């Protein structure tokens, strides 16, 4: 009985740990004219905001489908800038993707 309870507790901890990492989101970096990049909304918590379905249905610039977009991709910068190419300058997911193009970061 004790080993069964221990097994259940360990399994529950693994599920919780992996669920948390699946919910993790990301930030974006934008290329400046100098070859450096700026991390967008670095401390603003923007990456944790989920846009409602209405934004996808009522904005002609949104090219992503709400029902097929991963939940960690529903934040404003990803939907309105990164995937639509709006504005000027290149925008990448901050991390290994942006590191390929950025010399360094002005706000890292």
Image (cartoon, grey):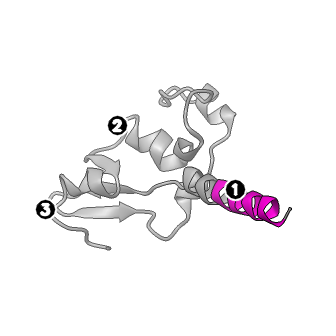
Q: Is residue 89 left or right of residue 47?
A: left
Q: Which residues are magenta?
A: 2-15
Majority secondary structure of magenta residues: helix
* Front residue of 94 and 77: 94
Disc 3 and disc 1: Cα gap in Å?
A: 49 Å
Q: Is residue 103 left or right of residue 66?
A: left
Q: How many neighbours does mark 2 have within 10 angstroms: few (below 14), some (14-19), or many (20 or more)?
A: some
Query: What residue sits right under mark 2 in the picture?
Result: 85
**Badge 2 element:** loop
Marked residue nearer the N-terminal end (2 or 3): 3
Q: Is residue 10 above or below residue 98?
A: below
Badge number at residue 11: 1
Marked residue nearer the N-terminal end (1 or 2): 1
Q: Residue at x 73, y 57 (%)?
A: 12
Check if residue 52 falls in the magenta segment.
no
Q: Residue at x 19, y 52 (%)?
A: 100
Check if residue 12 falls in the magenta segment.
yes
Q: How many neighbours does mark 1 have within 10 angstroms: few (below 14), some (14-19), or many (20 or more)?
A: few
Badge number at residue 81: none
* Front residue of 1 and 16: 1
Marked residue nearer the N-terminal end (3 or 1): 1
Q: Is residue 58 above or below residue 100?
A: above
Q: Position of residue 23 (x, y in %)?
A: 59, 52
Q: Position of residue 104 (x, y in %)?
A: 19, 67
Q: Residue at x 77, y 57 (%)?
A: 8
Q: Position of residue 19 (x, y in %)?
A: 63, 52
Q: Residue at x 32, y 58 (%)?
A: 95
Q: Quadrant of the C terminus?
A: bottom left
**Badge 1 element:** helix
Q: Position of residue 46 (x, y in %)?
A: 54, 58
Query: What residue sits right under mark 3 in the picture?
Result: 34
**Badge 3 element:** loop
């Amino acid at each position: 009985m004790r080993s069964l309870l221990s097994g259940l507790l360990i399994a529950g901890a693994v599920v919780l740990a992996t669920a948390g990492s699946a919910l993790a989101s990301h930030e974006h970096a934008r290329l400046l004219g100098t070859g450096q990049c700026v991390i967008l909304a670095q401390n603003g918590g923007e990456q944790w905001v989920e846009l409602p379905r209405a934004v996808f249905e009522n904005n002609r610039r949104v090219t992503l489908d709400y029902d097929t977009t991963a939940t960690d991709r529903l934040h404003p910068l990803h939907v309105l800038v990164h995937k639509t190419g709006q504005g000027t300058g290149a925008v990448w997911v901050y991390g290994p993707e942006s590191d390929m193009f950025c010399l360094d970061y002005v706000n890292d």
